[in-house]
Amino acid sequence: MNILKVGDKAPELHGVDQDGRPVSLKDYAGKKLVLYFYPKDDTPGCTAEACNLRDNYDALRKAGYEILGVSVDSEKSHQKFIGKYQLPFRLLSDSEKKTVEAYGVWVEKSMYGKKYFGTARVTFVIDENGIIERIIDKVDTKNHSNQILQN
Protein backbone atom coordinates (compact mmCIF):
# COMPACT_ATOMS: atom_id res chain seq x y z
CA MET A 1 0.00 0.00 0.00
CA ASN A 2 1.15 3.49 -0.83
CA ILE A 3 1.60 5.79 2.18
CA LEU A 4 1.31 9.38 1.03
CA LYS A 5 2.22 12.37 3.14
CA VAL A 6 1.96 16.15 3.03
CA GLY A 7 4.48 17.53 0.53
CA ASP A 8 4.30 14.52 -1.80
CA LYS A 9 3.32 14.91 -5.44
CA ALA A 10 -0.26 13.73 -5.83
CA PRO A 11 -0.56 10.51 -7.85
CA GLU A 12 -2.37 10.63 -11.19
CA LEU A 13 -6.08 9.91 -11.25
CA HIS A 14 -7.42 6.89 -13.13
CA GLY A 15 -11.02 6.42 -14.14
CA VAL A 16 -13.92 8.32 -15.59
CA ASP A 17 -16.52 10.67 -14.16
CA GLN A 18 -20.25 10.03 -13.94
CA ASP A 19 -20.61 10.91 -17.64
CA GLY A 20 -17.84 8.60 -18.84
CA ARG A 21 -15.31 11.42 -19.35
CA PRO A 22 -11.71 10.61 -18.38
CA VAL A 23 -10.52 12.43 -15.26
CA SER A 24 -6.93 13.63 -14.88
CA LEU A 25 -5.03 15.77 -12.39
CA LYS A 26 -4.28 18.03 -15.38
CA ASP A 27 -7.99 18.94 -15.40
CA TYR A 28 -7.31 20.75 -12.11
CA ALA A 29 -3.92 22.30 -12.91
CA GLY A 30 -3.59 25.77 -11.38
CA LYS A 31 -6.47 25.10 -8.97
CA LYS A 32 -6.68 23.76 -5.44
CA LEU A 33 -8.36 20.37 -5.44
CA VAL A 34 -10.31 18.70 -2.65
CA LEU A 35 -10.00 15.03 -3.59
CA TYR A 36 -12.29 13.13 -1.27
CA PHE A 37 -12.46 9.36 -1.15
CA TYR A 38 -15.60 7.72 0.19
CA PRO A 39 -16.82 4.12 0.53
CA LYS A 40 -20.17 3.98 -1.30
CA ASP A 41 -22.79 6.11 -3.04
CA ASP A 42 -26.08 6.73 -1.22
CA THR A 43 -25.08 5.34 2.18
CA PRO A 44 -25.71 7.45 5.30
CA GLY A 45 -22.16 8.71 5.98
CA CYS A 46 -21.29 9.20 2.33
CA THR A 47 -24.53 11.05 1.70
CA ALA A 48 -23.97 13.33 4.72
CA GLU A 49 -20.46 14.12 3.48
CA ALA A 50 -21.52 14.79 -0.13
CA CYS A 51 -24.46 16.96 0.97
CA ASN A 52 -22.25 18.96 3.34
CA LEU A 53 -19.86 19.66 0.46
CA ARG A 54 -22.84 20.53 -1.77
CA ASP A 55 -24.35 22.88 0.81
CA ASN A 56 -21.02 24.70 1.20
CA TYR A 57 -19.95 24.45 -2.44
CA ASP A 58 -20.07 28.22 -3.04
CA ALA A 59 -17.88 28.93 0.02
CA LEU A 60 -15.41 26.23 -1.05
CA ARG A 61 -15.26 27.60 -4.60
CA LYS A 62 -14.87 31.15 -3.27
CA ALA A 63 -11.88 29.88 -1.24
CA GLY A 64 -10.41 28.57 -4.52
CA TYR A 65 -11.24 24.87 -4.21
CA GLU A 66 -12.51 22.45 -6.83
CA ILE A 67 -14.17 19.29 -5.49
CA LEU A 68 -13.83 15.74 -6.82
CA GLY A 69 -15.28 12.70 -5.09
CA VAL A 70 -13.87 9.21 -5.69
CA SER A 71 -15.33 5.78 -5.02
CA VAL A 72 -15.23 2.41 -6.74
CA ASP A 73 -18.93 2.70 -7.64
CA SER A 74 -19.99 2.66 -11.29
CA GLU A 75 -20.72 5.68 -13.49
CA LYS A 76 -24.42 4.78 -13.36
CA SER A 77 -24.36 4.69 -9.55
CA HIS A 78 -22.64 8.10 -9.52
CA GLN A 79 -25.25 9.52 -11.91
CA LYS A 80 -28.06 8.40 -9.59
CA PHE A 81 -26.25 9.76 -6.51
CA ILE A 82 -25.64 13.14 -8.18
CA GLY A 83 -29.23 13.32 -9.44
CA LYS A 84 -30.81 12.34 -6.13
CA TYR A 85 -28.86 14.94 -4.12
CA GLN A 86 -28.16 17.59 -6.82
CA LEU A 87 -24.40 17.38 -6.32
CA PRO A 88 -22.63 20.19 -8.22
CA PHE A 89 -19.24 18.44 -8.54
CA ARG A 90 -17.84 15.49 -10.46
CA LEU A 91 -17.51 11.97 -9.07
CA LEU A 92 -14.77 9.67 -10.31
CA SER A 93 -15.65 6.03 -10.91
CA ASP A 94 -12.57 4.01 -9.95
CA SER A 95 -13.95 0.57 -10.73
CA GLU A 96 -10.46 -0.78 -11.49
CA LYS A 97 -9.25 0.52 -8.09
CA LYS A 98 -6.15 2.19 -9.58
CA THR A 99 -6.71 5.56 -7.91
CA VAL A 100 -7.74 4.21 -4.49
CA GLU A 101 -4.63 2.01 -4.50
CA ALA A 102 -2.34 4.85 -5.69
CA TYR A 103 -3.59 7.04 -2.81
CA GLY A 104 -3.36 4.20 -0.27
CA VAL A 105 -7.05 4.30 0.66
CA TRP A 106 -7.99 0.76 -0.46
CA VAL A 107 -7.72 -0.87 2.95
CA GLU A 108 -8.78 -3.88 4.94
CA LYS A 109 -11.87 -3.16 7.01
CA SER A 110 -13.90 -5.16 9.48
CA MET A 111 -17.64 -5.25 10.11
CA TYR A 112 -19.35 -7.65 12.51
CA GLY A 113 -16.09 -9.61 12.70
CA LYS A 114 -15.92 -10.10 8.94
CA LYS A 115 -12.86 -8.71 7.16
CA TYR A 116 -13.11 -7.19 3.69
CA PHE A 117 -11.43 -4.55 1.53
CA GLY A 118 -12.98 -1.16 0.91
CA THR A 119 -12.29 2.53 0.47
CA ALA A 120 -11.20 4.49 3.54
CA ARG A 121 -12.85 7.88 4.02
CA VAL A 122 -9.89 10.22 3.48
CA THR A 123 -9.60 13.66 1.88
CA PHE A 124 -6.51 15.03 0.17
CA VAL A 125 -6.20 18.77 -0.35
CA ILE A 126 -3.93 19.24 -3.37
CA ASP A 127 -2.39 22.62 -4.21
CA GLU A 128 -2.25 24.36 -7.59
CA ASN A 129 1.00 22.55 -8.44
CA GLY A 130 -0.25 19.04 -7.72
CA ILE A 131 1.38 18.75 -4.28
CA ILE A 132 -0.52 17.30 -1.30
CA GLU A 133 -1.10 20.21 1.06
CA ARG A 134 -3.23 18.44 3.68
CA ILE A 135 -4.62 15.00 4.45
CA ILE A 136 -7.82 14.73 6.45
CA ASP A 137 -8.15 11.16 7.68
CA LYS A 138 -10.65 11.78 10.47
CA VAL A 139 -13.49 13.10 8.35
CA ASP A 140 -16.49 14.61 10.11
CA THR A 141 -19.10 13.81 7.46
CA LYS A 142 -21.59 16.43 8.67
CA ASN A 143 -18.98 19.22 8.94
CA HIS A 144 -16.44 18.25 6.30
CA SER A 145 -16.47 21.65 4.58
CA ASN A 146 -15.42 23.33 7.84
CA GLN A 147 -12.53 20.87 8.15
CA ILE A 148 -11.37 21.83 4.64
CA LEU A 149 -11.82 25.58 5.11
CA GLN A 150 -9.91 25.61 8.42
CA ASN A 151 -6.39 25.96 7.11
Image (cartoon, rainbow, N blue to C red):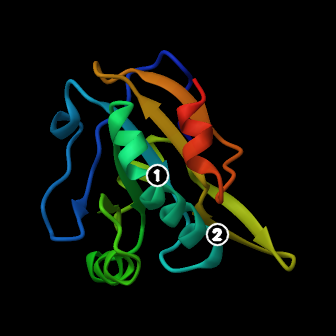
Which residue, given by chain and number where applicable, does mark 2 sit on? 45
Q: In the rendered structure, which amino acid carries the disc numbered 2?
A: Gly
| In the image, farthest residue toward the right | 113
Figure quadrant of residue 76: bottom left
Q: How many residues crowd mark 2 within 10 Å: few (<14), some (14–19), many (20+)?
A: some
Which residue, given by chain and number where applicable, does mark 1 sit on? 56
Q: Are marks 2 and 1 in contact (CB under 8 Å)?
A: no
Front of the two marks 2 and 1: 1
Q: In the rendered structure, which amino acid carries the disc numbered 1?
A: Asn
Disc 2 secondary structure class: helix
Q: Viewer-proximal residue, 82 or 105?
A: 82
Say above or below: 96 vs 148: below
Figure quadrant of residue 77: bottom left
Q: Left or right of 68: which side holds 150?
A: right
Q: Quadrant of the N terminus?
A: top right
| In the image, farthest residue toward the top | 7
